[in-house]
Amino acid sequence: MQTTEVTHNTVINYGQTRILSDQEFKQFTDLIYDECGVSLSVDKRLFLESRLKKRMDELGIKNGQEYFAFVTGVKSKYHELPTLLDALMICETSFFRNAPQFDLFSQTVLPEVIARKEQVGSRLLRVWSAGCSTGQEPYSAAISMLEAVRYQPDWTLRVFASDLSFTALERAQNGIYRADQMKSVAPHLTRKYFHQENSNFVVNDEVKRRVTFDYHNLKNDNGLRNLDVIFCRNVMIYFDREEQQRLVNRFANCLMPGGYLFIGHAESLQWLSDRFTMIHKDKGIAYKLVA
């Protein structure tokens, strides 16, 4: 059985030293919530402390209060606060992640949207990958769109990809992936949309030029409107219900009537919004904005 004792501002858990007092933990979690809407509960304390310690070691800062003063300081916060938020991001993704969802996107959603566009004489498809991590999701969306329109030159395809992590965005823009990261890409799509450089696979320019990467905090509106599809998967799980409701409402305002929202398989819009209706096919689920 482990025991703990409190000495001034440091809580010692024998076998592990905490770097934050309870008060400091609350200061940091409040700051993070206010800045980006991510809610870190007590069970995420060790995660937060491990990320803080790494950054504090890099800066030569010895305690939590000193680092909090630094990250909120007038001169340093505009650089350090984004760096802190970047350090907290969990960049877990893969190409065509959750295959049933991408099947639904490719086989049902895109044909419907394309048919609707053709009826009104439009040749523009616009998709937003919110929380795009290291780029596999937006590139997967762009590849699916290219396949759907079969290279018809009069179609304009745009994928807006955003994230809170500058590190992830830099990797995404490079579009370079290891061989083990390509396992979920069908061989014919690998041959068609990637080329090899040494042992890595690089996204071809015809895909890259359809994707625009940008830094964006989902706490704020980025001004995108009239989108056909939004992907925001495994992001809302880090928000509390109030922030989830705000975010879903913001997504609804960004979509065209009849547009689609894809969220994580462990996420749901139940009790969050009545502006969407759920559609599903072969274990793939999406939410359609009620026109």
Image: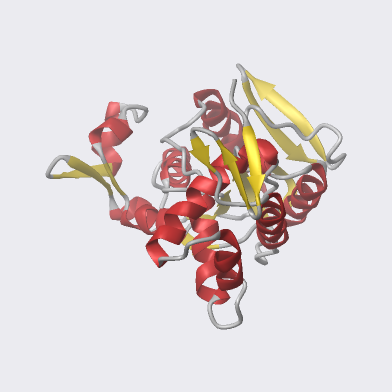
Expressed as whole percent of the image width and height from the top left, the position of residue 191 reads: 24, 36
Residue 263 is at least partly visible in this image: no
Query: From what the image shows, is residue 76 above or below residue 88?
Result: below
Which part of the image, by quadrant, shows the N terminus?
Answer: top right
Residue 153 is at least partly visible in this image: yes
Instruction: Using the rendered view, name the quadrant where residue 183 is placed.
Output: top left
Q: Depth check: 144 or 59 in front?
A: 59
Which part of the image, by quadrant, shows the C terminus?
Answer: top right
Q: Residue at x 46, y 56 (%)?
A: 154
Color scheme of the displayed model: secondary structure
Expressed as whole percent of the image width and height from the top left, the position of residue 148 reads: 47, 38
Q: Depth check: 237 or 132 in front?
A: 237
Query: From what the image shows, is residue 125 above or below residue 95?
Result: below
Q: Residue furthest left?
A: 198
Asked whether, in this view, residue 58 is left or right of residue 75, the answer is left
Q: Depth check: 268 or 92 in front?
A: 92
Expressed as whole percent of the image width and height from the top left, the position of residue 133 reads: 47, 48
The image shows a total of numbered marks equal to: 0
Query: From what the image shows, is residue 57 above or below residue 106?
Result: below
Q: Residue furthest bottom?
A: 75
Q: Residue at x 48, y 62 (%)?
A: 62
Asked whether, in this view, residue 235 is left or right of residue 172, the answer is right
Q: Residue at x 65, y 65 (%)?
A: 222
Asked whether, in this view, residue 239 is left or right of residue 89, the answer is right
Expressed as whole percent of the image width and height from the top left, the position of residue 167 reads: 41, 57
Asked whether, in this view, residue 69 is left or right of residue 39, the answer is left
